[in-house]
Image (cartoon, rainbow, N blue to C red):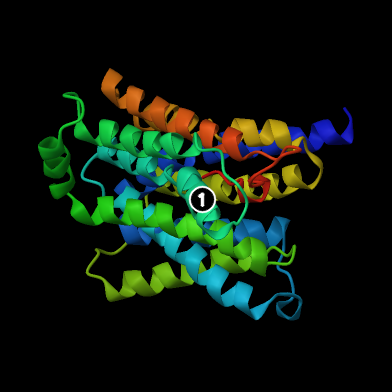
Amino acid sequence: MTDIRKYTLAGCLAILIWSTTVGFVRNVAEQLGAIGGAAMIYSVSSLFLLIFIGTPRFKDLSLKYLLIGGALFVSYEICLSLALGMANNRIQAVEMGVINYLWPSLVVLLAVFTSKKSVDKRLYPAIALSFFGVAWTVSGDGGISISQLAENIATNPVSYSMALMGAFIWAFYCNITKRLANGKNAITWFFIATAITLWITYFMSNEPAIVFTSGAAIDLLITGVAMGSGYALWNIGIIGGNMMLLATLSYFTPLLSTFFSALILDIELTATFWQGVIMVTIASLLCWWFTREKPSATIDMAPYIKVE
């Protein structure tokens, strides 16, 4: 197997592994608590990354990247993990995952606002489609209904707000850290910071004490390793893999994530739910397609590729 195929395979595995995390995180949260479970997950992931990736020296990293990028990363991970853990039920948790996948369209939208380059006008309907797809999913079986949408959100406004906020935060992270990182990767430090922040939040909260069972311990280990190995494999993939292929596959993550979540959580999703997910997936692909690098390029989106 040639090196490029090995790197590409690593990137493909990262996409598959990341597609399982929504279901795994929810599974752990049900057993160990929303905050405590998330703190444990990021602790295990941090240990995994320390072993397999290590940590860059602080003096090699930009202070702005550490502070701004770190704050955005930690905020995003906390918003997403708690939105999943605090969802009223498993189906609602999968909805949070779908809302999270607004970030590719939001990344493009922010890139458009900050770029002086020309933009394909077809991009804006694609962005609108992603929001329509989320609304279609959250509204339920009756299709788009403002009253039904508002009613569903009112059942758990905190989780819905965190999921949406997380999508915006990650869009900012992708746009800002590209300029601040200077080719460096502080992902291990960011994971450690996330774990510490979650533990502080846990000890300040009224959440019950964490009670371990053998099943919970196994699920925690699987989830922590999956999350950490996803980042580790993705780093390998982007070093020398086929980025065109990985970019294309990465935008199928909403569909893959929903499929694996339903499988892991043992739930059945309605046709309406799947229709919304497909809309979000198509919108993500269109946003990438309309902004891909080409001779008369507008905005190069390759640096923004990230799945989770």
* Residue at horizontal 73 percent and vertical 70 percent from the top: 56
Q: Furthest residue to the top? A: 271
* Residue at horizontal 50 percent and vertical 44 percent from the top: 104
Front-most of 104 and 7?
Answer: 104
Front-most of 46 and 136?
Answer: 136
Location of mark 1 (residue): 107
Q: Judge from the rendering whether residue 239 lies leftward or rightward of residue 1; answer left or right.
A: left
Instruction: Assign a secondary structure to mark 1.
Output: helix
Q: Quadrant of the N terminus?
A: top right
The picture places residue 308, in percent across and down from the top left corner, at 51, 45
One can see residue 118 in this view: yes
The picture places residue 98, in percent across and down from the top left corner, at 37, 38
The picture places residue 263, in percent across and down from the top left corner, at 40, 26
Q: Quadrant of residue 285?
A: top right
Q: Judge from the rendering whether residue 48 lies leftward or rightward of residue 82; answer left or right.
A: right
Q: Is residue 75 above or below residue 129?
A: below
One can see residue 218 in this view: no
Front-most of 240 and 216?
Answer: 240
Q: Furthest residue to the right? A: 2
What type is the residue that disc 1 sits on? Val
Q: Quadrant of residue 198?
A: bottom left
